Amino acid sequence: MSAEQNERAFQKQPTVFLGAGDKRALGKKSKRGQRYWRKVGLGFKTPKEAIEGSYIDKKCPFTGNVSIRGRILKGVVKTHKMQRTIIVRRDYLHYIKKYNRFEKRHRNVAAHISPCFRVNSGDSVVVGQCRPLSKTVRFNVLEVTAAGGGKKKGVKLFQKY
């Protein structure tokens, strides 16, 4: 297994035995050797990069030990400056009864992003709830849809209005 060793600790998948024998491995065979991956369910496909890639990420829902349960949310990528973490902006409308109108509001959600995805600001993502991964991260990216336009200066956050 030729995983990227760029951390201080040796990176390996705990379910794949790196010794001489093939008998004890739980991973599935691929062209490059054995690699553990699974389907997260709920109608989401496992990315090809998760199956054929060589990255090691214990918090990845496809190759790590994280199960997706609870809420499934959609949002727009606001920032992707952190390592393996993005900020997703979720817009919604709040009704003001006195004025019989709606006002725009938003919430930012921190989500772990697996190395099998490539994102930019403005991309639309689907995130699924999982166990707490850090102090603020409780969601994992399941699907990325690239933004339609080319490079724009401003990102339109409320598409409907």
Image (cartoon, rainbow, N blue to C red):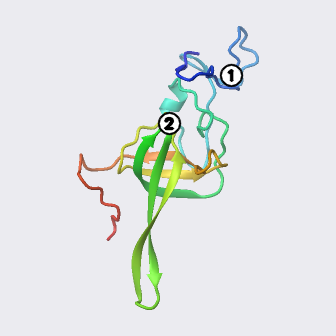
Which three-letter amino acid code belongs to the residue tagged 2? Pro
Q: Residue furthest bottom?
A: 98
Q: Earlier in the sequence, mark 1 or mark 2?
A: 1
Q: Which residue shows up at 56% across the image and 56% down it?
A: 72
Q: Quadrant of the C terminus?
A: bottom left
Which three-letter amino acid code belongs to the residue tagged 1? Val
Instruction: Identify the secondary structure beneath mark 1.
Output: loop
Q: Which residue shows up at 54% across the image and 38% down it?
A: 46
How many other residues sit within 10 Å of disc 2, few (<14), some (14-19) or many (≥20)? some
Instruction: Judge by depth and name the residue closer to the eye, 48 or 138.
Output: 138
Q: Quadrant of the N terminus?
A: top right
Instruction: Identify the secondary structure beneath mark 2.
Output: loop
* Residue 117 placement (x, y as % from top left): 45, 38
* Residue 146 placement (x, y as % from top left): 36, 46
* Residue 3 placement (x, y as % from top left): 55, 19
Label 1 vs label 2: CA separation?
20 Å
Q: Which residue shows up at 29% across the image and 50% down it?
A: 148
The residue to which callout 2 is attached is 47
Q: Residue furthest right?
A: 24
The image shows residue 114, relative to residue 109, as above or below, that is above
* Residue 9 placement (x, y as % from top left): 62, 22
The residue to which callout 1 is attached is 16
Q: Which residue shows up at 71% across the image and 13% down it?
A: 22
